[in-house]
Image (cartoon, helix red, strand yellow):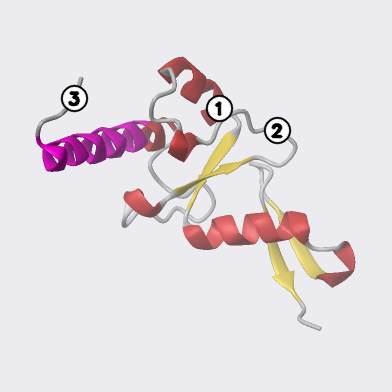
Amino acid sequence: MAWKNKEAERAYHRKYYAQRMARARKVLGDTCQHCGWNEYPEVLQFAHKHGYPKEIDISSSVEAAWSLVETELQKCLLLCPTCHAVYDLERKLPTSEVRSLENYEDGMTVVEVQLL
């Protein structure tokens, strides 16, 4: 279907995307699963759990069937930007640079890094 009004089309797609992401965040609790932050749920990020293959990118899966998104969400954590950065950093750092690790029940780890 061709839209006559391109601005109306963009507004429709922005609204659809926002609704789809809100639905996905709600599945995972609509709060950071590590620190509990939820002041602005729109900035929470989907982080794939280490060791689970990423089949689709949740944020880019607007046109994917919801059943595929739900399957992918089972392999994800919902994290605030800070916790997501630390979670990804933990995977990338050689263990010699990690000063202390503290494990949590959900498999996440808080990392303190000693800068060299």
Would residue 100 be found to the left or right of residue 48 on screen?
Answer: right
* Residue plotted at (38% across, 54% down): 43
> What residue does disc 2 label?
52
Q: Which three-letter amino acid code belongs to the residue tagged 2?
A: Tyr
Helix, strand or loop status at disc 3: loop
Residue 21 image point, x, y percent: 36, 37
Cα–Cα gap, marks 3 and 2: 39 Å
* Residue plotted at (81% across, 83% down): 116
> Would you say the residues marked 3 and 2 are in contact, meaning their CB atoms lie under 8 Å apart?
no
Q: Is 22 inside the magenta-drawn segment?
A: yes
* Residue plotted at (48% across, 35% down): 58
Rendered view: 90 above or below 114:
above
Q: Residue furthest right?
A: 96
**Which portion, as a residue range, is magenta?**
5-23
Magenta stretch prevailing secondary structure: helix
Would residue 5 be found to the left or right of residue 100 on screen?
Answer: left
Classify 10 Å Cα crowding around label 2: few (below 14), some (14-19), many (20 and above). Answer: few
Q: Earlier in the sequence, mark 3 or mark 1?
A: 3
Residue 25 image point, x, y percent: 39, 38
> What residue does disc 1 label?
72
Foreground mark, 3 or 2?
A: 3
Q: Which three-letter amino acid code belongs to the residue tagged 1?
A: Glu
Closest to the observer, 10 or 37? 10
Cα–Cα gap, marks 2 and 1: 10 Å
Closest to the observer, 13 or 24? 13
Would residue 99 be found to the left or right of residue 54 on screen?
Answer: right
> Would you say the residues marked 3 and 1 are in contact, meaning their CB atoms lie under 8 Å apart?
no
> What residue does disc 3 label?
2
Classify 10 Å Cα crowding around label 1: few (below 14), some (14-19), many (20 and above). Answer: some
Q: Quadrant of the N terminus?
A: top left
Cα–Cα gap, marks 3 and 1: 31 Å
Q: Which three-letter amino acid code belongs to the residue tagged 3?
A: Ala
